[in-house]
Amino acid sequence: MDPYRIETSDSGSQVLDMHVNISGRSSMPGKMKGRKARWSVRPSDMSIRTFNPIRAIVDSMKVKPNPKKTMISLSIGDPTVFGNLPTDLEVTQAMKNVLDSGKYNGYAPSIGYLSSREEVASYYHCAKAPLEAKDVILTSGCSQAIELCLAVLANPGQNILVPRPGFSLYRTLAESMGIEVKLYNLLPEKSWEIDLKQMESLIDEKTACLIINNPSNPCGSVFSKSHLQKILAVAARQCVPILADEIYGDMVFLDCKYEPLATLSTNVPILSCGGLAKRWLIPGWRLGWILIHDRRDIFGNEIRDGLVKLSQRTLGPCTIVQGALKSILRRTPQEFYDNTLCFLKSNADLCYGALSAIPGLQPVCPSGAMYLMVGVEMEHFPEFENDVEFTERLIAEQSVHCLPGKCFEYPNFFRVVITVPEVMMLEACSRIQEFCEQHYHCAEGSQEECDK
């Protein structure tokens, strides 16, 4: 029988080590061995390494909006904020039906119900990229899908390739895991296509994967089929797997075509991350997925088994949403998707047209998703040191909040979210124009151009 031990310690100077035996007698066998009893609670290395650049930059902004103007936030990538983009009634009814059924109140397998994974596989299956339920891992939103993919593909000390400008979560997750981030460049003058030579030059023996975000946050760009094929050629040549963040898949304007990356390659293994958040306008419901595309069996069983094991650290995504998934995927009418894209396209055109007419700004026309990036010719705004100061003053003077390009590793730009109501978008563009006109200065030696 193990003894009961009572310990007291005052700076290690006194230790009471009492052993109680069956007869109730006690003994003091001497100085206790083991951990010294004193408080020393420190944060983990992972928590110290974790850094969210958007939160760090936004939280450090000590600026108050103009009290005479209503705040217009063009900073949050949440399409539900203003209530003008509700999900379809079929989607909400599916959730009500599942709640009423009482069948989905318990635990599900960590990777999701088999029936739900079958629905996702069926929805995304095509001849060029076949899928079965075993190829689907359900997750708590696309963010967790990305986290699991990074965790299964890379070890501390390895590196991953991430777009610049790009979604800040990639860096936040990777660096918290001790994974190095290498930034490859997107080219605004080419509608944010990848600088392929520069990207390939970053690859070395420690490169674990290449992240491709298409359609893009923050750029709103959509890669052409030919450009995607060139990306795949680099991955095949260098034998680097791809993590494809395709959460905005199919959120593409009518004059453009979205190509799922896995449909264009048979020899590059791809983990494609997606979810319900954006296309179905329900980001708070937290259901995402990983689609495993590996027709040459390069991942083998190890990567699949690794994803399952990592999923088992928690109990998986919401069971209620999983129960509604069949109806959401099958019964949401095409009209809902079309109306969403029509609205986004209209707002994108409105915003791009208005900002293009403002001296000192260079917006890049988007082709999908919910964003556009706007270049700031900082030489014409000399009182601002950088894009962070520019956006801070925009809040202070005009009560318009845009995220500075620094949040996306891309200075001298800012990002606009185009999901706000049209009247609000018009008002925001008008205020941005007023702001720029008040602070615009001709660059030295260009007075003649300004006079025009």
Image (cartoon, rainbow, N blue to C red):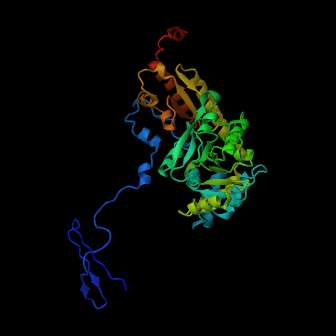
Which residue corresponds to the image point at 46% horizontal and 23% vertical from the top-left?
435
Pick whichever, 100 or 407, lies toward us: 407
Which residue corresponds to the image point at 41% horizontal and 40% vertical from the top-left?
59
Q: Quadrant of residue 198?
A: top right
Q: Quadrant location of the C terminus?
A: top right
Above or below, 279 relative to 23: above
**Label total for image:** 0
Q: Position of residue 450 (x, y in %)?
A: 52, 11
Camera sees residue 336: no
Which residue corresponds to the image point at 51% horizontal and 36% vertical from the top-left?
409
Q: Position of residue 411 (x, y in %)?
A: 49, 31
Which residue corresponds to the image point at 67% horizontal and 64% vertical from the top-left?
114
Pick whichever, 375 or 425, lies toward us: 375
Pick whichever, 85 or 287, lies toward us: 287
Camera sees residue 12: yes
Residue furthest to the right: 127
Residue furthest to the bottom: 23
Q: Quadrant location of the N terminus?
A: bottom left
User: As drawn, is 127 to the left or to the right of 379?
Assistant: right
Q: Position of residue 277 (x, y in %)?
A: 60, 48
Above or below, 178 relative to 405: below
Q: Position of residue 110 (x, y in %)?
A: 59, 63
Q: Quadrant of residue 236?
A: top right
